[in-house]
Image (cartoon, rainbow, N blue to C red):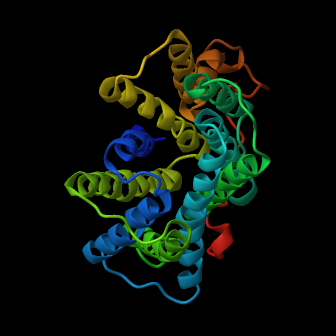
């Protein structure tokens, strides 16, 4: 595992976490679908202008599918969930994403998750719950369903980005996903929210930040991490999203950092660190260093040696 790609991928959830503060402070109220469309379509066109390229054959519909999964459907379902559920519950349900990504990567890319990584994801989810929970309230079944489906489809989209290899580079591939996703979001936003609102300088600045940092940069480094690293490593890093949002809220919005929230943050960070495959490998090597097998005794396999299966990346696109 290359640490630099993990650090780069971590920039994505940190940027996404800033979106809570930017949206609440600078953007028009109650227009999440309009905001999602603005984040996707114009910035997808900008990225395509900087990195032009055309898709070929079946890659048009494949990329359109990814645009719907990663942007259109995900943003729409998250809007429904946030409208019908308390914010803490919606964020906790969304935090189940690492589990879903690991299981889908096992099914579609042959990356069998380690039990320690799955357990770390559960610890992280518990930490998110402590970090964002604001008390019990009525639970809306449709909101819960929308949140879980949003997690499932975005996780599927991320794993498909990991396994599919289109005839264009990742920047162009991401640009087309944003364009297709934005084209679907525009009519949905018009039907659900009406005509676009007036945007002042603060709103334009907020959209510029969310579009450039929270969308273009974030998704490019996230997709790059998904391609280069184990799904467990990158998906667990995604739990930094609510941590980033909390830190920014405390620093800029005057929110309180209570002992419960500190405990939640510690659980999240601990889960992210302990569940990393590189950390698990290091622990395994350390334990194996003192074993009889590590001393060269015959007939035993060193504890640090793993039996790896064949690399199945690319199996879905027929390249292998």
Q: Residue at x 29, y 51 (%)?
A: 206
168 vs 27: above or below = below
Q: Residue at x 61, y 26 (%)?
A: 133
Residue 131 lies in what quarter of the image?
A: top right
Q: Residue at x 55, y 73 (%)?
A: 191
Of 41 and 202, the residue lying toward us: 202
Q: Is residue 126 left or right of residue 188?
A: right
Q: Where is residue 29 drawn, in percent x and y? A: 42, 51
Q: Where is residue 19 drawn, in percent x and y? A: 40, 45
Q: Is residue 160 left or right of residue 293?
A: left
Of 310 and 190, the residue lying toward us: 190
Q: What is the number of callouts on the image?
A: 0
The residue lying furthest to the bottom in this view is 57
The residue lying furthest to the left in this view is 201
Quadrant for the C terminus in the image = bottom right
Q: Where is residue 51 drawn, in percent x and y? A: 29, 74
């Amino acid at each position: 595992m290359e640490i630099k790609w993990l650090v780069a991928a971590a920039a994505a959830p940190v940027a996404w976490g800033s979106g809570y503060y930017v949206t609440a402070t600078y953007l028009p109220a109650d227009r999440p679908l309009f905001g999602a469309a603005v984040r996707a379509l114009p910035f997808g066109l900008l990225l395509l202008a900087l990195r032009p390229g055309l898709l070929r054959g079946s890659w048009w519909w494949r990329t359109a599918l990814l645009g719907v999964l990663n942007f259109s459907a995900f943003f729409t379902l998250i809007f429904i969930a946030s409208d019908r559920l308390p914010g803490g519950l919606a964020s906790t349900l969304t935090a189940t994403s690492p589990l879903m990504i690991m299981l889908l990567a096992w099914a579609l890319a042959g990356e069998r998750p380690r039990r320690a990584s799955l357990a770390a994801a559960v610890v992280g989810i518990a930490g998110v719950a402590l970090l964002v929970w604001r008390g019990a309230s009525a639970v809306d079944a449709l909101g819960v369903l929308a949140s879980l489906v949003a997690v499932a489809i975005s996780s599927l989209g991320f794993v498909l980005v990991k396994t599919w290899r289109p005839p264009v580079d990742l920047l162009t591939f991401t640009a087309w996903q944003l364009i297709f996703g934005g084209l679907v979001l525009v009519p949905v936003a018009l039907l659900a929210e009406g005509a676009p609102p007036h945007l002042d300088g603060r709103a334009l600045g907020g959209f510029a930040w969310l579009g450039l940092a929270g969308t273009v940069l974030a998704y490019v480094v996230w997709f790059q991490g998904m391609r280069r690293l184990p799904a467990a490593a990158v998906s667990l890093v995604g739990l930094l999203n609510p941590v980033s949002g909390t830190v920014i809220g405390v620093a800029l919005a005057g929110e309180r950092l209570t002992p419960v929230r500190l405990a939640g943050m510690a659980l999240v960070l601990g889960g992210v660190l302990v569940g990393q495959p590189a950390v698990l490998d290091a622990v395994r090597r350390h334990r194996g260093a003192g074993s009889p097998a590590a001393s060269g005794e015959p007939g035993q396999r060193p504890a640090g040696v793993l039996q790896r299966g064949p690399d199945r990346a690319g199996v879905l696109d027929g390249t292998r």
